[in-house]
Image (spheres, grey):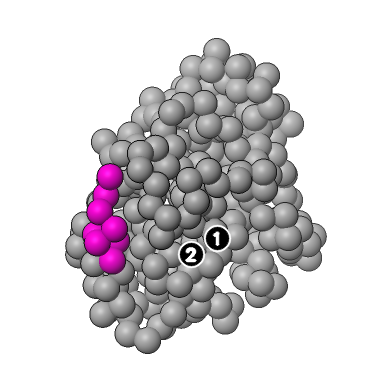
Amino acid sequence: MIPFEHYQESAKYIRGKIGGFQPEILLILGSGLGQFGDGVENPIIVPYKEIPHFRHSTAPGHKGRFVFGTIAGKRVAVMQGRIHLYEGYTPEEAVYGVRVMKLLGVKTMIVTNAGGAVNLDYKPGQIMLISDQILLFPMTPLIGPNDERFGVRFPDMSTAYTPSLRALAREAAKETGVHLNEGVYIYFPGPQYETPAEIRAARLLGADAVGMSTVPEVIAARHCGMDILGFSLSTNMAAGILDQPLTEEEVLETGEACKESFSKLMLRILQSM
């Protein structure tokens, strides 16, 4: 279990870098989506590697840094890159940044990822609003002794993704003309892509998209009492749907191609919050 003092020391270091700036929204940007953080106004950049006790991000396309500043008038803390279990970290280490942001006063988290489309009606390049999630593996960050300073022992997950924020996202999609799917995200730890058999099983379980992140962070944020909004960019059709191999290059290329529509939607959502 990570000592609470480590979270406090990380938060203290960041406060020393950002001064009196008070972030209200945490944005976690997934593979291929990190460029949205480059639009932060009056940015204060804090690399993960400089923060005491913070883990490093090694995934392709992840810059591994916080960007503090404003977007659409909202005070944000943007994580350009996240920590994954497949990098060798524990679930608790993977959500470390979420808990540090809680200590800094963040109340809302917007989490994004690049995922594979399980739903056969989806197309690469489309954005999915996450309505719910599936965790099949015993990899929750809440395993072990509970720290009441973050949340209760048994947090409710009935509405892991805040309904009012999802309604706001739907309205923002209509206003901006961005096509928005809505569905369930299933978590596989990776780093190998899923097999066709696993994808068929995921579809039977009711999943619409699959990926290697997000779920641990959402559990931690819900435990901390944050409001949560989540999006999965369908960067490819999941394994077995098309007769072609899956590659990380495809993920990053699709993210680059969709950055305009993604940014348009995110800006409108932030303006409405």
Along the viewing direction, whichever of 146 and 243 lies nearer the viewer? 146
Residue at (55% x, 13% y) in the render: 197
- Dot 1 and dot 2 residues touching (CB under 8 Å): yes
Residue at (40% x, 71% y) in the render: 104
Along the viewing direction, whichever of 68 and 100 lies nearer the viewer? 100
Which quarter shows the C terminus? Answer: bottom right
Identify the residue under disc 1. 226
Residue 54 as seen in the image, left or right of residue 259: left
Q: CA distance from mark 1 to mark 2?
A: 10 Å
How packed mark 1 is, by other alpha carbons closer than 10 Å (few <14, some 14-19, many 20 or more), is many
Q: Which residues are magenta?
A: 1-8
Which quarter shows the N terminus? Answer: top left
- Residue 187 visible in the displayed image: yes
Residue at (60% x, 45% y) in the render: 156
The correct choice, above or below, for 59 with respect to 102 in the image is above
Residue 219 as seen in the image, left or right of residue 166: left
Task: Locate residue 228, reporting x and y percent.
Answer: 59, 56
Q: What's the amino acid at mark 2?
A: Leu
Along the viewing direction, whichever of 118 and 177 lies nearer the viewer? 118
Magenta residue check for 7? yes
Residue at (21% x, 57% y) in the render: 53
- Residue 243 visible in the displayed image: no
Magenta residue check for 67? no
Give the number of the mark in front: 1 or 2.
1
Q: What's the amino acid at mark 1?
A: Met
Along the viewing direction, whichever of 58 and 8 lies nearer the viewer? 8
Identify the residue under disc 2. 26
Task: Locate residue 225, reporting x and y percent.
Answer: 54, 59
Q: Quadrant of residue 165?
A: bottom right
